[in-house]
Image: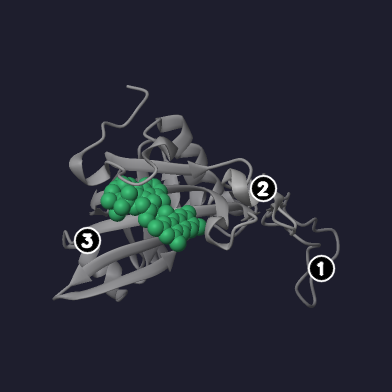
Amino acid sequence: MTSYTPTPRTTLHRRAHRGSYDRATVHAILDEALVAHVGFAVEGNQMVLPMTFVRIDERVYLHGAPSNHMLKALAGGAPLCLTVTLLDALVFSRAASHHSMNYRCVVALGQAREVRDLAEKKRVFDALVDRMAPGRSQQARPATEAEMVATRLVVLDLEEVSAKIRTGAPFDEEPDQSWPCWSGLIPLALEAKAPVPVEGLAPGHEPPGARK
Ligand SMILES: Cc1cc2nc3c(=O)[nH]c(=O)nc-3n(C[C@H](O)[C@H](O)[C@H](O)COP(=O)(O)OP(=O)(O)OC[C@H]3O[C@@H](n4cnc5c(N)ncnc54)[C@H](O)[C@@H]3O)c2cc1C
C-alpha cells in the first residue's frame, strides 16, 4: 500500500485538496523535520511538548528520562497526536486577509508502546544520533547498556496519518490584484551555520558532515 487509509479522524475538512496520505510524502516530511510536537492528556490535563524523534520504516520513536511525565503516560497507553511542521515561505498577498505560509506538515494519531528490547533500543539510539549527521553514531562513544536501560523509548506505529501541504504563490481576488503593495513569497529555510568546536578540542577532528 503506497498510501495511508484516511479515517474519520484524519479526514481533512478545510482546504482538503492540500491533504495527502501518500506514505513517501509523509516519510519525507518526517525525515526532514528535527522536532515533533506531541499532544497527549493525562488525568484531564492536556499538554503539547516538543521532542526529538526518528522514523524507521513505519514507526516513529520518542525517547527520554523514565521520569518524563509524557513518556510515562505514553508507555501506559495514553492516546497521542504527533505533529511536525516545515515552513517553506511567508506568503504576502495584497489583501491582509490572504496572508499565509507555505508549509509541509504531518499529523499522526495513535497509541504508543514502550520498547524494552536492547538491540532495538541500540538501533534507534544510533538512528537518532545519525539524524544530526550521517555516520555520527560510529564516531561518538557508544551508549552503554546502563544508559540504554536508563532511557525510556516509546514507539508509535504510523497507521492513522495525514499530511497537508501548501505551495505556490499568494492568492488575491481579482479586485485586489491592483492594490499598491508588494506581493510575493519570502522563502524560508533552516540553515546550518559554521561549526563551533568545543574549547580544548584535540586537533585532527573534523566536524560532522552537514545534515542533508
Ligand atoms: C504554519 C501553519 C499555519 C496555519 N495557520 C492556520 C490558521 O491561522 N488558521 C487556520 O484555520 N488554519 C491554519 N493552518 C491549517 C491548520 O493546521 C488546519 O489544517 C486547519 O485549521 C484546518 O483544519 P480542519 O478543520 O480542516 O481539520 P480538522 O478537522 O481539525 O482535522 C481533521 C484531521 O485533518 C488532518 N489535518 C488537519 N490539519 C492538518 C495539518 N496541518 N497537517 C496534517 N494533517 C492535518 C488531521 O489528520 C486531523 O486529525 C495552519 C497550518 C500551518 C502548517
> Which colour assignment does the render follow?
one colour
Residue 177, which numbered label? 2
Three-letter amino acid code of the residue under disc 3: Ala
Instruction: Name the residue at 75% across, 57% down.
Output: 182
Q: In the picture shown, does residue 45 fall above or below 104?
A: below
Residue 142, which numbered label? none
Three-letter amino acid code of the residue under disc 1: Ala
Relative to residue 184, is residue 41 drawn left or right? left
Callout 1: few (<14), some (14-19), or many (20+) C-alpha neighbours within 10 Å?
few
Return the residue at label 1.
202
In what element is the residue under mark 1? loop
Q: Where is residue 151 in the image (x, y as percent from the top left)?
A: 36, 65
Q: How far apart are marks 1 and 2 (CA)?
A: 60 Å
Mark 1 vs 2, N-terminal side: 2
- Closer to viewer: mark 2 or mark 3: 2
**Quadrant of image for the C terminus:** top right
Q: Nearer the viewer, residue 118 or 100?
A: 100
Instruction: Name the residue at 57% across, 41% down.
Output: 167
Return the residue at label 3.
75
Relative to residue 107, is residue 180 drawn left or right? right
